[in-house]
Amino acid sequence: MQLLEIIKKLEGKSDHQRSEFIEQTLIRWGIPYEIHPYATGRNILLPSGRPQWIGISSHFDVVKNSPGANDNASAIAVCLDLIRRNQIKPLKSLGIGFFFFDEEERNLKGSTAYVKQLGINGMTGLINLEMVGQGDRLALWSLTEKSKGRILKTLESTANAHNIFTRRFDRIVTNQADHMSFQKAGLVDAFTVTCISEKDIEVAWHYYKAQEFDVDQTTLWEIITQAPLFKHYHQPSDLSEHLSEESLQMTSNIIWQTLLALDK
């Protein structure tokens, strides 16, 4: 599956159009799904159907005036790819459910509503995908060196076996992503995966160092926008032309290989 082609169909589209694209894709593939409506939006759910299960999530909403290619059409594309893989060669015993959350950009409203209304019963963990379209390594957040979890450990070891560098971060600038709704509800093994580059790590060091000296927000923003990850973040320039098929496939492959390892 060419994931950049999915992103091209999603970029510049409204929240409703993105949601409709996801639904129509699932219908075309013959994959059942559910709509979870709440006061201000609607999430798309693919329940596991098993008593113990892992969640894989992304959000489909986009900020105003941004085409939303990396944030977050890239994650939608990878989620759809993982759904397709599981349809073609289903996991044997591992329960897996998928989420496409609404209103992540509005203070995590979609995932917060899901957790509040439906809870986390049976969930053993969550891998949330956020901005996975550029870079050659994976940021795992919000985590510390003391963070533990079977899913986290398996993903890190799987990436290492494939010579993919991973690094834990306690936050990535705003530290806002849908995994936080699940962490707050008590799900320990929940985190977000973001695709980054060596330059992103270098800029992150300077950014956090600057924070120690209490510099103003304008200066901090000037620093962070030197990172490829944030150069087009929430900007009209967040376009598919800046993304890489290799990055998307790398992310999908590592997540899938992680799930296969957990399925043994």
Image (cartoon, rainbow, N blue to C red):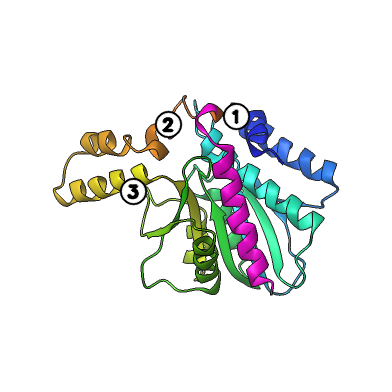
Image quarter hosting the N terminus: top right
As for residue 258 lying within the magenta part, the answer is: yes
In the image, residue 43 sits, relative to residue 183, either above or below, namely above
Residue on which the image places disc 3: 201
As for residue 8 lying within the magenta part, the answer is: no
Residue 226 vs residue 48: left or right? Answer: left
Residue 156 vs residue 45: left or right? Answer: left
Amino acid on which the number 2 mark rests in the picture:
His
In the image, residue 60 sits, relative to residue 13, either above or below, namely below
**How far is mark 1 from mark 2, CA to CA?**
13 Å
Q: Main secondary structure of the magenta part?
A: helix
Residue on which the image places disc 2: 232
Q: Which residues are magenta?
A: 241-264
Judging depth in this view, the residue of 212 and 103 nearest the camera is 212
Amino acid on which the number 3 mark rests in the picture:
Ile
Image quarter hosting the C terminus: bottom right
Residue on which the image places disc 1: 11
Between tags 3 and 2, which lies in front?
A: 3
Identify which residue is drawn at 53% across, 27% down.
Answer: 241
Between tags 3 and 1, which lies in front?
A: 3
> SS at mark 1?
loop
**N-terminal-most mark, 3 or 1:** 1
| x, y percent for residue 240 | 56, 30
Count the labels in the image.
Answer: 3
Amino acid on which the number 1 mark rests in the picture:
Glu
**How far is mark 3 from mark 2, CA to CA?**
17 Å
